[in-house]
Amino acid sequence: MLSFVPIISFFVVGNYAFVPKVCTSIDNLTSKECCPVPPGSTEKCGGSGRGLCVDLRPPVVDNIEGFSGDVDRFNWPMTFFNRTCKCLGNFDGFICTFCKFGWTGPNCDVPKTRTRRNILTMTREEIDEFIGYFHQAKDTGSDYMIPTTLSSDTDKGKDQHFNEINVYDEFAWYHYYVSRENLVETEGNDTDDHQSFVFADFAHEGPSFPTWHRAYLLLFERALQKVSKDKDLTIPYWDSAGEPNCTVCNDEYLGGSNGTNNHTVTGSFSDWRVLCHGHEELTKSGQLCGNMINSYASPPITRNPGGDERWKQQNKRLPSKEAVYFALSVRNYDSVPDDFHHLNNSWKTSHCSFRNILEGFADSENKTGLYMDLVHQLHNGVHLYLNGTMSSLAVAASDPIFFLHHANTDRIFEKWLRRYDVSRDEFPGKSTPTGHNRYSYMVPFFPVYTNDEFFQRSEHFGYTYNDIDSQGLPLDPIEREREVTSVNGMEKCQMPTP
């Protein structure tokens, strides 16, 4: 059982989000430096040829006027470290001991391409092996620690604490943290109890939705490779478009649904629990989900495919293939909505935007590309169709089907990037929601990455998909003809008349 670990018992100006274990010493936290000495070296970050300890450039800080409460993520990661390792050549990682995505070898100078596959084309042995790696990740302690208290608590005289966490839950926690509703405005004077939430989501409802999740999947894939010692491991994808039902929601794949027990997941994941269950109540009391409660005290993950009555007919079925074709026909990556205001922290009202159509806030089933209230299609639609754990943003990654769904979402993103040979300059650089700027650091990844770094074709990161060619078109001739005919025949998305 992973334990609760108090790290410091005095006050340090600033705050600390999750950090590498080797950088949780008092010296590191007071100096705000995370430049460890790698094994086998005598120099910080490995020294010449591997990595150097440098000052971080100040992050692109978006407009935070009007926000209050815990605003740690706006200044990521300078609130706790301002000196980190800058890896040289193709080295990567917080200590420069990994290779950059797409490289391998002792000197990280050997190119490496891996292929993500449709889980439905994998053999029984391959599926069982992959599921086993998920369980290994649950049973393996992470190299990182997560906070159990907010920095605002340390400012009030409380100690900062960190908690150990397993590798799988580490990534489930990332998704909670990046999207948590932690920004609170107090209306009236300090004695009033009335508070309102101002949402700041650094990975959804804005331009960084595809890029943040691309980096997230690559980092999780790397973690699984380390846990399994399988350097060729990739996350499979579940191509749900056009399916009459969830073909992976059974005990042969990712578990079925127990209709007599609140639709808890059956099969090999039946004992998995929801990380950060009750996060809404924690937010109301100004607390952070820190994984301090024994995970087995949380409820099990649930699924009820097509059974959510809240959305009536809209999410009783999976997205159509035609909806995917329509998304691919829209050339514009993203655009500033007419009603955007930084306190809204959302671009979900964007019209004729590939990103917004892919994410699922703009209509693809009717092929309009326009935002409509309560529309949840494509990516969003699959989350809601699955119901249960997957339909709640902050805890969705507790269900392992999350990663297969997002691998497929990334696959559609990749088809679009290849189809239009997109330039990194097309990623929006102004008037974006918080954290969604082209050069914003991605919260809460450490070492730091920017959005524009991941607005590139997958070959740059050493992976591809088994069913598409260099132009993003299907390799299967029948599907290729269907897609090309459909995409070319789509009417151009028309912005609504003012």
Image: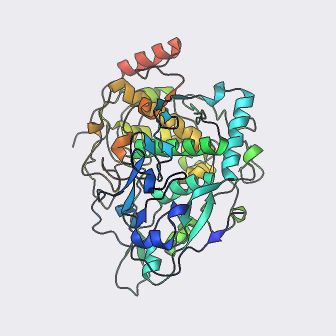
* Residue 146 image-quadrant placement: bottom right
Q: Quadrant of the N terminus?
A: bottom right
On screen, 19 above or below 87? below
Q: Which of the two residues, 316 or 454, is positioned nearer the viewer here? A: 454
Percent x, y for residue 219? 51, 45
* Residue at image location 53% in from the left, 37% down from the top: 407
* Residue at image location 67% in from the left, 27% down from the top: 122
How many tags in the picture? 0
Looking at the image, which residue sits at the far bottom? 191
* Residue 385 image-quadrant placement: top right
Percent x, y for residue 182? 45, 67
On screen, 453 above or below 418? below
Q: Residue 298: in sight, yes or no?
A: yes
On screen, 328 above or below 272? above
Percent x, y for residue 440? 33, 52
Q: Residue 376: in sight, yes or no?
A: no
Relative to 146, 253 lies left or right: right
Relative to 137, 240 lies left or right: left
Q: Which of the two residues, 491 or 64, is positioned nearer the viewer here? A: 64
Q: Which of the two residues, 13 or 241, is positioned nearer the viewer here? A: 13
Percent x, y for residue 317? 58, 36
Q: In which quarter of the image is the C terminus?
A: top left
Looking at the image, which residue sits at the far left? 498
Relative to 219, 364 lies left or right: left
Q: Which of the two residues, 353 or 491, is positioned nearer the viewer here? A: 353
Colour scheme in use: rainbow
* Residue 342 image-quadrant placement: bottom left
